Amino acid sequence: MKVYCFIPACEAEEVIECGLKLNSRLTKTIELQGGPIQCFETYLHPRDGISLNPDDVMVKIIVPEGRAYVADNSLLGELGELYNKSIIPVNQYKLGKYRKPCCLISCTVLPEMIERYNPDLDEPILYQSSEQLYRDSLFYKTDDLVQSFKDVALNAYYNMKAASGEYAVQFNDEYAAFIDEKSSEVIAIVKTRFNNDKN
């Protein structure tokens, strides 16, 4: 498994040639098995991380076995207890399980495990970001469980648009008709609420 992180451009060559020392990159301390573990954060997809400096260089790292964990960064802050519970060894993580997965590496990374990331030459990644993969997976999973889910989602979206004045809306017993007053387009959506029906 490979993960990604940003490093300052001025340090890029040294990191690629000499490795990445844990004590120079510490960003987080987690509690596991009753003790603190110091880590630095990396990401499962190049688009998951954000660099505050446009000159930073992205590198990809082969994850060291037994010294890396995945946590869900969408659970930080007031959801800290859930964040702590989300921390699992990297080999237990299934792609798409977390909304904002972050890989926490708890050791120095050797130079043969690091290389500069080149989006034009590296192997393609078949999804746009971890968050999009999570959202799409959750949407399809819910759609499989509940037949009315797409209608409920469409209802919520177009009612929001109508509330902001983008559409007028009229009703009959079964449908809501959303009318775009500029183009006269009419979008008919079933008036529905969640039920426990299954495909």
Image (cartoon, rainbow, N blue to C red):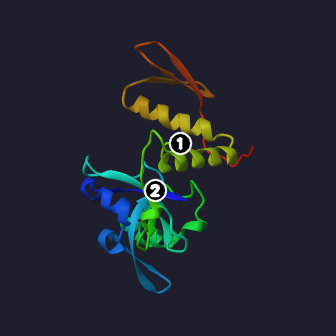
Q: Which mark is residue 124?
A: 1
Which quadrant does the N terminus fall into?
bottom right
In the displayed structure, would residue 135 be above or below residue 80? above
Residue 119 drawn above or below residue 182: below
Quarter of the image where the C terminus is located: top right
Find residue 95 and name its label.
Answer: none
Q: Position of residue 167 (x, y in %)?
A: 43, 23
Q: Can you tell which of label 2 and label 1 is closer to the viewer?
A: 1
Q: Residue furthest bottom?
A: 34
Most extreme residue toward the front, as rendered? 17
In this rendered view, identify the residue nearer to me: 124 or 43.
124
- Residue 150 image point, x, y percent: 61, 37
Res. 39 image quadrant: bottom left
Sequence-earlier tag: 2 or 1 = 2
Whether residue 50 appears in this view of the structure is no
Quick one: 90 or 165, which is closer to the camera? 90
* Kind of residue at badge 1: Pro
User: Residue 122, how many percent across, how many down?
Assistant: 49, 44
Residue 153 falls in image quadrant: top right
Please tell me the numbered disc located at residue 100: 2
Residue at figure coordinates x 24%, y 50% from the top left: 53
Residue 123 visible:
yes
- At label 1, counting other C-alpha atoms closer than 10 Å, the crowd grade (few under 14, some 14-19, many 20 or more) is few
Kind of residue at disc 2: Lys
The local secondary structure at tag 2 comes to loop
